[in-house]
Amino acid sequence: MATARVMSAATNTTGSCSLLKRPFFSLTKKVPNFNNNHLRFNTTTKGVSKRSFSCKSIYNPNVQIKEEGQPETLDYRVYFLDNSGKKVSPWHDLPLHLGDGIFNYVVEIPKESSAKMEIATDEQFTPIKQDTKKGKLRYYPYNINWNYGLLPQTWEDPSFANAEVEGAFGDNDPVDVVEIGERRGKIGEILKVKPLAALAMIDEGELDWKIVAISLDDPRASLVNDVDDVEKHFPGTITAIRDWFRDYKIPDGKPANKFGLGNKAASKDYALKVITEANESWAKLVKRSIPAGELSLV
């Protein structure tokens, strides 16, 4: 018989979403500029769009996670519940924006673990489960060294070819986050993070963004606000993240992943641009302006 365990998620929000008639974010036109070994952009400002999809969030500690089944089994699921006990989607129902460049982030894979946990984008309420291949549970060949998860209300559109990243198409998933704080997160935990950099990973021809971020609860969070700060206060971390994601498939006999943008980590501003565009793509998805295919919109 399956077991169920309910627990509070550490940092949670509920919120309301709306289409705004004004841009919620300023974007810029960019000219690449390599400086201090990182990709930056000279910019001219313009609005994202005349109608942007955004969420206003309210801090709410009552969101809970409910585990069903046993960890490291095919039946294991981590569901999210609102304060009435109703299942909600961590992808669609948790707000992205918290204001002032801060975002909600859901931990899928805690640091120093190897089970490949992920949002089940094709299941109702999109719970977290362990990924499978040919009916077998998937594991990384070695532990991941950072908390890894997703930004809610984002989507990498597989019909969009990104001209800035070798024309690669989106990977049909929410945007990934590598959280570099010192504390080990828990599966399903919701953290407030600030983005610091972006890596444009290309996985078998698909664009799979990795946003480097830090939890606001981390003791060094106030020290880092952009990619150069990461190098100063977390030396070698950007390179380690890139190398880890480049090489993790090699032990299984697959080629190394590639990275666009000159193999460099892009700045915080560029990371915010990636998040904004992915949020707009998600809004089109849930409004059914783009075919959902097998993706669950519930």
Image (cartoon, helix red, strand yellow):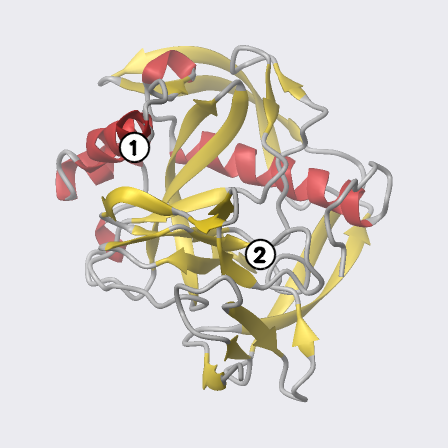
Mark 2 vs mark 1, CA separation in Å = 31 Å
What residue do we see at 58% from left, 45% from top?
174
Q: Is residue 37 left or right of residue 46?
A: left
Kindly tell me whether residue 101 is visible in this rendering: no
Residue at horizontal 68%, vertical 89%? 84
Q: Is residue 116 above or below residue 262?
A: below
Determine which quarter of the picture holds residue 156.
Answer: top right
Q: Is residue 145 above or below residue 272?
A: below
Counting from the top left corner in percent of width and height, residue 242 is at: 29, 29
Name the residue nearer the viewer: 141 or 10: 141
Amino acid type, callout 1 = Tyr
Residue in the foreground of this view, choosing between 40 and 15: 15
Q: Dot 1, crowdedness within 10 Å: few (<14), some or many (≥20)?
A: some
Q: Which mark is residue 181?
A: none
For residue 152, side relative to residue 61 (left or right): right
- In the drawing, does residue 131 fall left or right of residue 72? right
Give the tally of numbered discs.
Answer: 2
Q: Which mark is residue 248?
A: 1
Of residues 59 and 179, the one nearer the viewer is 179
Viewer-side label of 2, 1: 1
Q: CB atoms at circles 2 and 1 under 8 Å apart?
A: no
**Which residue is the site of mark 2?**
97
Identified at 42% across, 36% down, the residue is 210
What's under tag 2, amino acid-wise?
His
